[in-house]
Amino acid sequence: MLSLLQKGDQSQMPAMPAWHPNFRNLERLPDTKVVRTQFFVNFAAIAVAAFFLLYFAIQEYRIKALSRQVADWQAQIDTNKKSSDQTLVLAKRFADEERKIGELNDFLKCRLVLTQFLLQIGNTLPPELAIDAVDVRAKAVDPRDMGVSLHGTVAGAREEAAGRANSYVDQLKQDRYFAEVFDDVSQKRLEPDQTSGRLNFELFLRFKGAVTKK
């Protein structure tokens, strides 16, 4: 009877927990990690943030350095601008003076003495012709345009005036003075003048050797 009572009491006693963990229940296992996973995640995030901070800091430093260089260069440009502008003005003046000297040299090479030329024109000009303008071209893009243009009028009927202009061209070609200075005399224009009733003409005397000049 006592044994039955003891057995019954043991069956009613609460179960004691096992002396070792149940390895089949992972949720009840203790956390045995020395370094937690969260630590590596935080470390990686901090490392990435530090990298970007360092990268942007380097870029900012480079931008500031470039800005300082640009400012220095601009200061040098501003300092040299005044002298550069003065140099450009002097260079332009020099080019203008050089052009004038070149034109004078070309004019002197033509061996044309203007006073002597005008006197010779006056001596050879027929009374029916009048010279209104003399254009000396000592320098031209095309060497064949270097010479003297005579602009004037000739009196008489159209056919008669045209014949007088052509005769004057032949006269200039045969003149000794003009033959020494010019290698050709040609008539460029011959047209009636509605106001005066005369014929307007233009003669061109090309300098000797102008065809071979460059």
Image: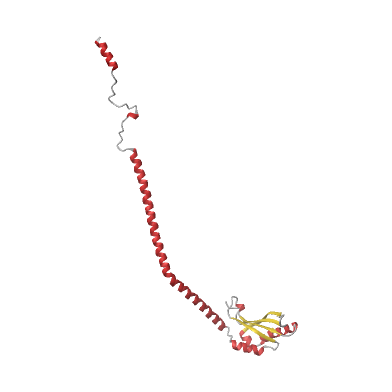
Residue at (38%, 59%) from the top-left corner?
65
Where, by quadrant of the figure, is residue 18 drawn? top left
105 over 72 or under it: above or below: below
Q: Nearer the viewer, residue 139 or 69?
A: 69
Q: Where, by quadrant of the figure, is residue 58 drawn?
A: bottom left
Instruction: From this view, report whether residue 212 is shown above or below residue 59.
Output: below
Residue furthest to the left in view is: 2
**Going by the image, does 41 lie left or right of 90?**
left
In the foreground, 150 or 180: 150
In the rendered image, the vertical position of residue 95 relative to residue 35, given as above or below: below
Q: Nearer the viewer, residue 73 or 97?
A: 73
| Colour option used | secondary structure
Q: Residue at x 38, y 49 (%)?
A: 52
Q: Is 37 left, or right, of 110 in this rendering? A: left
**Is 21 on the left-hand or right-hand side of 143?**
left
Residue 11's x, y, as percent? 29, 16
Which corner quadrant holds the C terminus? bottom right
Q: Position of residue 3 (x, y in %)?
A: 25, 11
The quadrant of the image that shows the N terminus is top left
The quadrant in which residue 37 appears is top left
**Residue lying at 73% horizontally and 84% vertically, measured from the top left:** 161
Q: Position of residue 72 (x, y in %)?
A: 39, 64
Pinpoint residue 138: horizontal percent, then vertical percent: 58, 81
Q: Nearer the viewer, residue 143 or 149?
A: 149
* Numbered marks: total: 0
Outermost residue toward the bottom in this view: 123
